[in-house]
Image (cartoon, coloured by chain):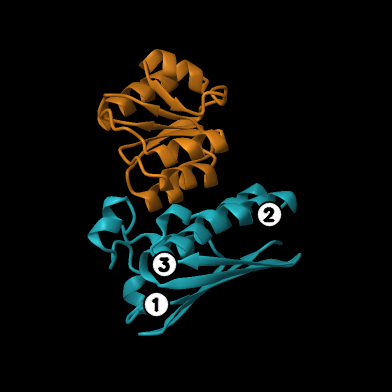
Chain colours: A cyan, B orange
Amino acid sequence: MELKYEVSGGDFTKAGYASSAVKKVLKKLSVDPKIIKRIVVALYEGEVNVVAHAYKGTISVDISPERIFIRIEDEGPGIPDIDLAMTVGYSTASPAVREMGFGAGMGLPNMKKNADELNVSSKVGQGTTVELITNLN
Amino acid sequence: MKVSDIIEKLDLKVYSGKESLDTEVTGGYTSDLLSDVMGNVDEGQVWITLQTHKNIMAVASLKDVAAIVVVKGFQPDEATLAQSNEEGIPVLGTDMEAFEVSGRLYELLKA
């Protein structure tokens, strides 16, 4: 099963929409609630990253009996130093975004903690692709 | 202890989600950083925060919290309340600061 969602950069009113939709689908498929929780945390962080940093993005979720594969692809400024971006507490978020309680430098680390595999690739000036893989067995 | 018991004992205001006050409360979490809450709050806990914008409902709903308590008399946004009613997760309020309401909730749940 494949699901697809569009995410608009800067539009915080809709942040979490895709995560919520995916949560509902996984619940219907009777995926283990503990696994759903991990996926939802990781996906929400990814969704917020697109809203906070990119111009627009696409989330695709591929569900098979063995694993859930999520790809978050954005058009945006890209990440010059991925290792630095993975550091807890490091953030490039704007003051306005931080005031809302985002931008604490916990997004990518939270994603890593809550996925079995996290792949981040990025081209500066073009965009970032994040893959989250969660094994179901 | 249910959300309704906490409302009564801590004299909290109910802004929204009036139909959903029967949820059992398993604990609490106090933080204003959404990623921190996303990563650490557990299902059934009460989330204490000073944030009032709509995104707190996304976090609350994704993590199945029992209720949100907005501190220091801050007024939640209209969009927050609309989503709260839709999701069935109450937004409560108090004039207390986070420190005080957290401490009092801790004492209540410990008893």
Residue B71, compared with residue A130, is above or below; it is above
Q: Residues within 10 Å of mark 1 (few under 14, many from 20)?
A: many
Residue B64 lies in quadrant: top right
Q: Are marks 3 and 1 in contact (CB under 8 Å)?
A: yes
- Disc 1 marks a residue whose amino acid type is Gly
Q: Amino acid at mark 3?
A: Gly
What residue is at 51 percent from the left and 27 percent from the top?
B25
Report the residue marked by disc 3. Answer: A9
Q: Spatial distance from mark 1 to mark 2, Cα to Cα? A: 29 Å
Query: In the image, what residue occupies the spot 37% across and 79% down?
Result: A78
SS state under label 1: loop
Residue A6 - label: none
> Disc 2 designates what residue?
A26
Instruction: Specify the subunit that label 2 lies on.
Output: A
The image quadrant where one finds the N terminus of chain A is bottom right
Choose between A32 and B15: the one closer to the eye: B15
Does B9 sit above or below residue B44?
above
Residue B62 position in % (x across, y down): 53, 47
B48 versus B57 height, above or below: above
Residue type highlighted by circle 2: Leu
Q: Secondary structure at mark 3?
A: loop
**Which label's residue is closer to the chain start, 1 or 2?**
2
Instruction: Name the mark nearer the viewer: 3 or 2.
Output: 3
Q: Is residue A137 above or below residue B62?
A: below
Q: Quadrant of residue B78?
A: top left
Q: Which residue is mark 1?
A: A76
- Chain bearing tag 1 is A
Residue A81 appears in the rendering: yes
Nearest to the observer: residue A122 or residue B77: B77
| Precedes in sequence: disc 3 or disc 2 | 3
